[in-house]
Amino acid sequence: MNATTVFESIHHPHGASWGLVYTRFLARPLGVCIIPLMVGATTSALLEQPVWGYLVWGLPAALVLATVWTHFSLGRTPAELSFRSGQAAVRSVYDVLRGQPRDWRPIFNVRTTAWSVEVAVGRTTHLFQPEQWPKFEALRDAARQSFQPQASPSSYG
């Protein structure tokens, strides 16, 4: 396997703008952070307690937390997986959006099952699942093919 084989996850931007990709990733963290705030404010209002604290302190804190969570998710979510002989490169959504070059690392281990592919690339082990990778079967085959375990030393005897 001398040629580079590239696989794209369902999270790959495919040329979408930064703002659109960011908005898609922001929706879940924003919901998770705002719902407790809304429940607390509603409860306070029903108990005839002041709700200003939720608006003044809670809303900005929720927005900051959602923003940090989104930036973390963009940097940790694999968008692209590339293989070549003995090496692999994983690019996050953030890396793809910024046009970062592939960072090729040696493949130390590949474990495959019907439900996942586990690839040890450099110092990190990545788990790839079929629902996030449209060409999962080809990805599994390419991972197996590009992994080159070290030949065991011959016995001296």
Image: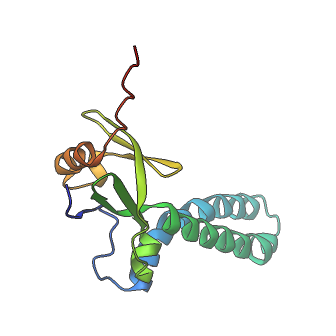
Q: Nearer the viewer, residue 125 or 64?
A: 125
Residue at 33% over, 51% down = 86
Residue at 71% over, 57% down = 43
Residue at 39% over, 28% down = 153
Q: Nearer the viewer, residue 7 or 22?
A: 7
> From the image, which quarter does the C terminus lie in?
top left
Please name the colour scheme applied to the rendered image: rainbow
Image label count: 0
Residue at 35% over, 65% down = 11
Q: Is residue 76 above or below residue 95?
A: above
Return the x and y of residue 31 as percentages of the image width and height.
54, 64
Left or right for 38, reference 27: right
Return the x and y of residue 72 as percentages of the image width and height.
57, 65
Q: Nearer the viewer, residue 46 or 31?
A: 31
Left or right for 61, reference 87: right
Quarter location, residue 120: top left
Left or right for 114, reference 37: left
Return the x and y of residue 90 as percentages of the image width and height.
40, 61
> From the image, which quarter does the N terminus lie in?
bottom left
Q: Nearer the viewer, residue 117 or 54?
A: 117
Left or right for 85, reference 99: left
In the picture as drawn, the residue positioned furthest to the front comes out as 157
